């Protein structure tokens, strides 16, 4: 059973259609990067999953319909929203322990879980502070800690690293990877595409309310990205030595640059073709187009 199944999700705010009939699913244990420019529909989709908005279509979390079985679903999901939604009258530790109480934990269990999370998110020394007295990064840590209080099977993080310093971002990456390795399904939105490239196994790109790419990270890089092969030879190579089917070949003396889709797969053939012509290869270097560059290109094509 998939962790999440979204079928034909549509959401309108008045006359504006923010999500235009999207469908996708995420397997249990997956780490899904939900990417898209500002206003693409990411938060709207997430709010529908969380049952915070009315919508058309259907969403199931681990087989439970998010509308009809809202209570069951809310126990399965941990959520860290893009906007801070704290009770400003609570302290840091109260924020976590009240959330624990909300999920039915009692006494010692609440205390134990609160201590664990305060420590895990480096909030112990700030435990007595009121929310108002926290910096942006501390609030971000607290909202993620609160989302984890009931050890959810699925974690949804809407821009968890926005406004977070470099050190904390790296700590968070480690924590998220560990949670995912331990079996938690994670859905992450971020504007740091490099972060998604590093953490996620599957990438969905949404633009103007429609999914424009959805696949494993490897397939996206392979099918949508171009690769560049830099070859250095002993002797200069004459123009036209290589057949330039589906790729761009640049001849600059002893430097050959070959660019195109699927070049990495063709590398062997290219090298043996040079060898068969008696050309000695000194160095080979392959570079892959980054996810960020692919993202900018395919979103840009739709503007
Ligand atoms: N409460 C609302 N009322 C009216 N329109 C809204 C509301 N919330 C979002 N929208 C609109 O819906 C569209 C999608 O917004 P959404 O917040 O889902 O985007 P997003 O992908 O999360 O963007 P960001 O990266 O900026 O967080 C936008 O055009 C936005 O202006
Ligand atoms: Mg958003």
Image (cartoon, helix red, strand yellow):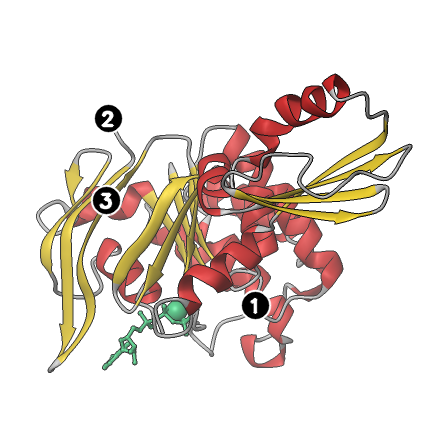
Q: Quadrant of the C terminus?
A: bottom left
Q: Is residue 224 visible?
A: yes
Q: Position of residue 225 (x, y in %)?
A: 51, 47
Q: What residue is drawn where x is 24% and y is 54%?
A: 49
Q: What residue is drawn where x is 48% and y is 62%?
A: 297
Q: Position of residue 78 (x, y in %)?
A: 39, 49
What is the spatial separation of the Cα atoms under label 1 and label 3, in whole angstroms? 26 Å
Residue nearest the observer in this picture, 228 or 34:
228
Q: What residue is drawn where x is 11% and y is 82%?
A: 15
Considering only order in the chain, which callout, 3 or 1, is on the residue closer to the N terminus?
Answer: 3
Image quadrant, ligand 1: bottom left
The quarter of the picture where residue 181 lies is top right
Residue nearest the observer in this picture, 158 or 112:
158
Which class describes the residues within 10 Å of circle 2: few (<14), some (14-19), or many (20+)? few
> Which residue matches tag 2?
1
Instruction: Tell me: 93 left or right of 185.
Output: right
Asked whether disc 1 touches disc 2, contact meaning CB atoms under 8 Å apart, the reply is no
Q: Secondary structure at mark 1?
A: loop
> Which residue matches tag 1?
162
């Amino acid at each position: 059973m998939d962790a999440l199944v979204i079928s034909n999700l549509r959401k309108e705010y008045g006359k504006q259609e923010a999500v235009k009939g999207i469908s996708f699913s995420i397997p249990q244990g997956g780490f899904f990067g939900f990417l898209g420019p500002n206003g693409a529909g990411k938060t709207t989709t997430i709010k529908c999953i969380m049952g915070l908005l009315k919508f058309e279509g259907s969403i199931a979390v681990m087989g439970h319909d998010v509308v009809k079985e809202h209570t069951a679903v809310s126990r399965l999901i941990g959520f860290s929203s893009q906007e801070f939604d704290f009770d400003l009258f609570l302290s840091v530790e109260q924020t976590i322990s009240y959330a624990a109480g909300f999920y039915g934990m009692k006494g010692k269990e609440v205390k134990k879980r609160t201590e664990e999370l305060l420590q895990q998110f480096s909030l112990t020394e700030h435990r007595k502070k009121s929310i108002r007295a926290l910096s942006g990064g501390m609030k971000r840590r607290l909202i993620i800690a609160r989302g984890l209080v009931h050890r959810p099977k699925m974690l949804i993080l809407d821009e968890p690293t926005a406004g977070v310093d470099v050190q904390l971002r790296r700590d968070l990456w480690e924590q998220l990877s560990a949670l995912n390795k331990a079996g938690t399904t994670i859905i992450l939105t971020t504007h740091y595409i490099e972060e998604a490239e590093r953490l996620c196994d599957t990438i969905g790109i949404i633009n103007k309310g429609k999914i424009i790419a959805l696949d494993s990270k490897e397939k996206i890089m392979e099918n949508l990205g171009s690769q560049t092969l830099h070859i250095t030879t002993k002797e200069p190579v004459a123009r036209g030595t290589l057949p330039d089917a589906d790729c761009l070949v640049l001849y600059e003396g002893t430097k050959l640059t070959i660019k195109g889709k699927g070049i990495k797969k063709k590398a062997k053939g290219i090298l043996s073709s040079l060898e068969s012509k008696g050309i000695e290869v000194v160095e080979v270097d392959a570079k892959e187009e980054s996810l960020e560059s692919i993202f900018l290109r395919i979103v840009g094509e739709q503007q």
